Amino acid sequence: MRFMIIVKASKGCEAGVMPSQKLLAEMGKFNEELAKAGVLLAAEGLQPTSKGVRVRFSGDKRTVIDGPFAETKELIGGFWLWQVKSKEEAIEWVKRCPNPHDGESEIEIRQLFEAEDFGAEFTPELREQEERMRAQMGQKQ
């Protein structure tokens, strides 16, 4: 099972405040543990929304909206992709994670869809297309 572990943004990270050396070291150690356990697929922090954009879709129309965006508690500050045996295992790993921000923080755990989750709608042709794309992605890494 694959999960996206979502670190919510804080006012500090949205203001461009970088993490302390202590937090970077703690997160580095935690990421090494994840990697050694074979859990870690990806781990990235995100730039503030002031450097981002959103694209709003309305039928065929596309509207680009420049950041920053309001509602910090709804924004993503970073993420991991993990491969674990269960949601419970993902929860146990998150409980071991250093607090990503000073004070209160929140980390969200969301399971990724797998090919079999789509049922008959995911035809053999679509499966083959997905496999080709994943093979191409693997060549770039």
Image (cartoon, rainbow, N blue to C red):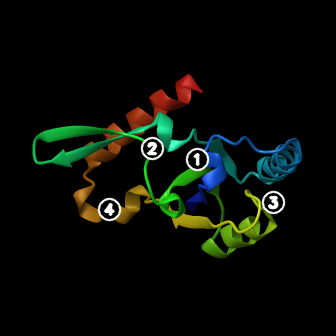
Q: Position of residue 8 (x, y in %)?
A: 59, 59
N-term-proximal mark, 2 vs 3 = 2
- Chain-order first, disc 4 or disc 1: 1
Vertical side of 20 occupied by 115: above or below: below
Amino acid carrying mark 3 in the image: Pro
18 vs 4, nearest the viewer: 18
Q: Residues within 10 Å of mark 4 (few under 14, many from 20)?
A: few
Image x and y of residue 15, in percent: 61, 44
Q: CA distance from mark 4 to mark 3?
A: 35 Å
Q: How many marks?
A: 4
CA gap between label 2 and label 3 equals 27 Å
Q: Earlier in the sequence, mark 4 or mark 3?
A: 3
Q: Quick one: which residue is furthest to the top in this view?
A: 140
The residue carrying mark 2 is 68
* Circles 2 and 1 in contact, beta carbons < 8 Å: yes
Query: Which residue is most to the left?
Result: 60
* Disc 3 element: loop
Q: Nearer the viewer, mark 4 or mark 1?
A: 1
On screen, residue 92 above or below 45: below
Q: Is residue 15 above or below residue 86?
A: above
Q: Which residue corresponds to mark 4?
A: 118
What amino acid is labelled 2 in the image? Answer: Pro
Task: List the residue tagged with mark 3.
Answer: 98
